[in-house]
Amino acid sequence: MFTKTEEIMLTEKLSHFEMPIEASYAMVKNNQLSVNAIAGISIRYATNNSIYANNVNLPLTLLGSNDSYSDSRLGIHIGLDTYYKINESFQLQFESIFKLQLKFYKNNTSNTPYLFNVQIGLRYRL
């Protein structure tokens, strides 16, 4: 399969399906600006957990999976969602969310990964 002198690249593919439950509270609301606090929980189910090896001479070869990840994970998140009204049809949206991943690893309870997500977008209303 592989020789000792070949350079081998390992690739890990991890994907999941997330089901969030979220609540928001309007902190500021006027004609031009709206700021909402967001809080919620989510459950994530792993859909792909694969480790591959490949090099220049051979195609991608499946080696197996990483068994340190939990198949289902619980997460909590908090954040702010801000809308700025440009005109009657367009709004500028800015959202920042902090997500804490609980039960991410099967055997390690002291390590809890987190994500900080920032999204900026333009919203159009018909």
Image (tube, rainbow, N blue to C red):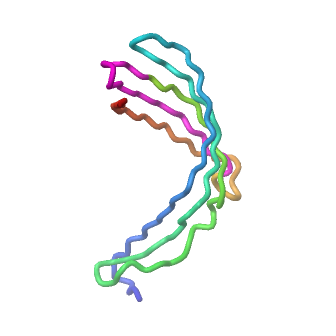
Q: Residue drawn at (38%, 19%), measured in percent from left and top?
A: 84
Residue 34 at what x, y percent from top left?
A: 46, 17
Q: Quadrant of the C terminus?
A: top left
State yes or no: residue 1 in magenta: no
Residue 87, magenta (yes or no): yes
Q: In which quadrant is the N terminus drawn? A: bottom left
Direction top: furthest residue: 30
Highlighted magenta segment, given as a residue range: 83-103
Quadrant in which residue 67 is drawn: bottom right
User: Which percent across, then down, holds residue 55?
Assistant: 33, 78
- In this rendering, position of residue 94 left or right of residue 39: left
Please, which residue is most extreme toward the front here? Answer: 126
In the displayed structure image, the side of residue 18 where residue 96 appears, left or right: left
Left or right, 121 with respect to 15, comes to: left
Q: Residue furthest left?
A: 56
In the rendered view, would you say 58 is above or below 79?
below
Q: Position of residue 20 (x, y in %)?
A: 60, 43
For the point 56% across and 63% down, the residue is: 47
Question: Which of the two residues, 89 or 84, is positioned nearer the viewer here?
Answer: 89
Relative vertical location of residue 98 with respect to residue 20 in this rendering, above or below: above
Dominant secondary structure of the magenta stretch? strand
Q: Nearer the viewer, residue 80 or 98?
A: 80
